[in-house]
Image (cartoon, grey):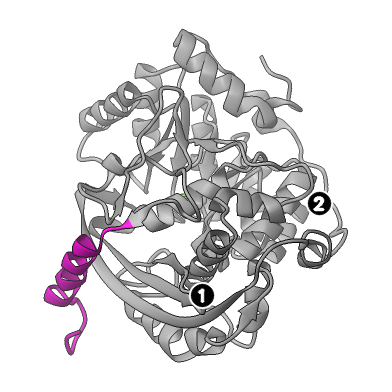
Amino acid sequence: MLSNIDFPWSLRKLFCAKFYKGKSACYNLVDFAHTPLPPPSARSSSFRGAASSEKDDDLKPITIKSVQLHTVLLPYLRPFETSFGAETHKVAVLVELTTETGVVGWGECSIELWPGYGHETAETATHILSEFLAPAVIGETLDHPTDFPTLIRRFRGNHHARAGLEAAVWDAFAKRNDLRLTDCFAHYAPDGHKTEGRATVGVSIGIQDSLDATLAAVSARLDQGYCRIKLKIKRGWDIEVARAVRARFPDILLMLDANSDYNIGDAEHLATLDQFNLLMIEQPLSHDDIYQHGVLQSRMATRICLDESVKSASDLLVALQVGAIGILNLKPARVGGFSECLEIYRICAENDLPLWIGGMLECGIGRSANLSFAALPAVNLPSDISATDRYFDPDLTEPPFALDGDSTLAVADGRGIGVDVQRDRLEVAKQAWRDNYPYGGGA
Ligand SMILES: [Mg+2]
């Protein structure tokens, strides 16, 4: 068994490799789950200040000339069901940013049709981007992509919208400097944090019609090579599905995601999940709660992973202080962009908090950017960034991301996000949005 101390840092290389080479090792994570976390480290210095003053030697700035938005609708290969309901299509507002030197950067505003996971919708994001955020940055020169939040700091909230625009800035900046996006992120990461060029990934399995269907879905994903299985759960679909999957697959890295479907009155019920040797349970309580998650964590052994509740670095510090978090699922869209991600990344590294990158079922633009971030070394648990063929055929970008045998995805090999937007497919997806416009009044 791994020690409590070295588990999080060595999982990528040891756990997954062991599982796939031996397929018989039994990993007992209970001791890991019981490990108390130390109080959070004080914020030592301004991360952004350090990045600007110490690492800016030879990078070329960009000046933003224009911003164009593309709202797209893209069918999933199969519906994806969570406690929110079933999703059949991907909706996204894609941000195409052009610089004065003609560099084009792309960002994906991960969004939903209705304010379920987050507060925003495709139309609110379009409104905020077109009326406020884009006008605030056009004509501006950025010496560093980490300067972006300062340009829009007079606008509050709307994290998904701002994350989409910031992602386009990062892509353009990396391309301008002939860097892969992952190398660009590493440049602004703490000293010594070099990109690994690939990330260990798992797969998320939505709520199925039956236990048999769930077992079949898990089996299929394991056969494809994924080393970590995440099951979406909800009230009435939790204990028995965990029991069935654990009974069939006693050795796999297994976790559950409740998407806020429970409350603290369910603590005793949730604690019964401890028997299934779970890697973590993700966001069991309310999307805006931190304190009660700390109460719940004191009543169950399985580590609580926060998703929706951590919308900023400040939220993360609170969660650490009250013992509400044992693992973080970091979604760039949720926290407002990659600059905030880097601040959160630094806090996780300083506090030895296990970290992985979550997803919003992004198309290739957002998938590539998230993967580029997940390749940083302190992202030390499998991320929710599946291969392209998990969701789309075809995607809006080429080449697709394919799973390697060790449950990793390699970052795209090219400048910026390293994948090319296919204009013909983009137009089809934009037309699909117009043809199926879901709100009153028409697009
Ligand atoms: Mg989640």
Q: Quadrant of residue 121?
A: bottom left
Q: CA distance from mark 1 to mark 2?
A: 43 Å
- Residue count near mark 2 (Cα–Cα under 10 Å), binned few <14, some 14–19, many ≥20: many
Residue 297 location (% of width, % of height) = 64, 44
Mark 2 beta carbon near ligand 1 (under 8 Å): no
Q: Is residue 14 magenta?
A: no
Toward the viewer: 64 or 18? 64
Residue behind mark 2: 40
Of marks 1 and 2, the one in the foreground:
1
Give the residues in magenta: 421-443
Residue 208 location (% of width, % of height) = 24, 40
Q: Residue furthest left?
A: 435
Q: Residue shown at 67%/69% (left/top)?
A: 144
Toward the viewer: 88 or 141? 141
Residue behind mark 1: 101
In the rendered structure, the answer to whether residue 11 lies left or right of residue 353 reads: left
Q: Quadrant of residue 289?
A: bottom right
